[in-house]
Amino acid sequence: MTSLSLKKWLPGILFLSAQIINTLYELTRDTRTISWAPHTTQVFYRIDAFQDGAAWERQAIEARYGLAQTQWEAHAPGNLRRLVYSVEAQALTHPDSVKISYRRNGAPEQTYLWKASR
């Protein structure tokens, strides 16, 4: 390859390399950033919030977090955890705990539990 030809192709090769490396990295993590890869994770989840041992109503949960209480999420389960954390970090009042039950790509169910620090 000549020097002129290398200068012409170098930006494209670097960009493609960065995308390939990022895609391989994202497949092993629970987040999605800029990547050409399609969503390889489907998460079926349920969010429950509890105050003094009593479960919150579905409408209260959906209004607080801005998404359905039970639904499919086309991204990683980390998105749900970050959503709960960010909402609770900004809210003036908190439930005692928030439980997210989820199955990633049909795998066995896992649970994330957020607890209010009192």
Image (cartoon, rainbow, N blue to C red):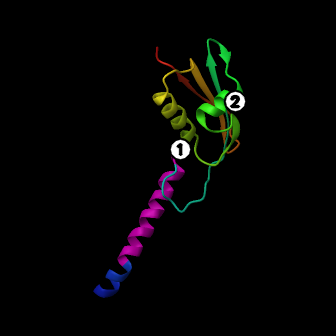
| Mark 2 in CB contact with mark 1 (< 8 angstroms) | no
Question: Which circle, 2 or 1, is nearer the viewer?
Answer: 2
Residue kind at label 1, given as amino acid type: Asp
Inspect this view and state whether residue 2 appears: no
Disc 1 marks which residue?
30
- Vertical relation: 21 (above or below) 68: below
Q: Outermost residue, left direction?
A: 3
Q: Is 25 covered by the magenta stretch? A: yes
Disc 2 marks which residue?
59
Q: Is 5 covered by the magenta stretch? A: no
Q: Name the residue at 46% across, 29% down.
A: 89
Q: Position of residue 90 (x, y in %)?
A: 46, 30
Which of the 4 image quadrants contains residue 71? top right
Which of the 4 image quadrants contains residue 98? top right
Task: Identify the disc placed on residue 71.
Answer: none
> Which secondary structure dominates the residues rendered in magenta?
helix
Q: Name the residue at 56% across, 17% down.
A: 96
- Vertical relation: 116 (above or below) 36: above
Between 72 and 11, the one nearer to me in the picture: 72
Q: Outermost residue, top direction?
A: 52
Between 46 and 8, the one nearer to me in the picture: 46
Q: Position of residue 47 (x, y in %)?
A: 65, 30
Q: Position of residue 28 (x, y in %)?
A: 52, 48
Upstream in the sequence, badge 2 or badge 1?
Answer: 1
Q: Left or right of 76: which side holds 106?
A: right
Q: Which residues are magenta?
A: 10-31
Residue kind at label 2, given as amino acid type: Gln
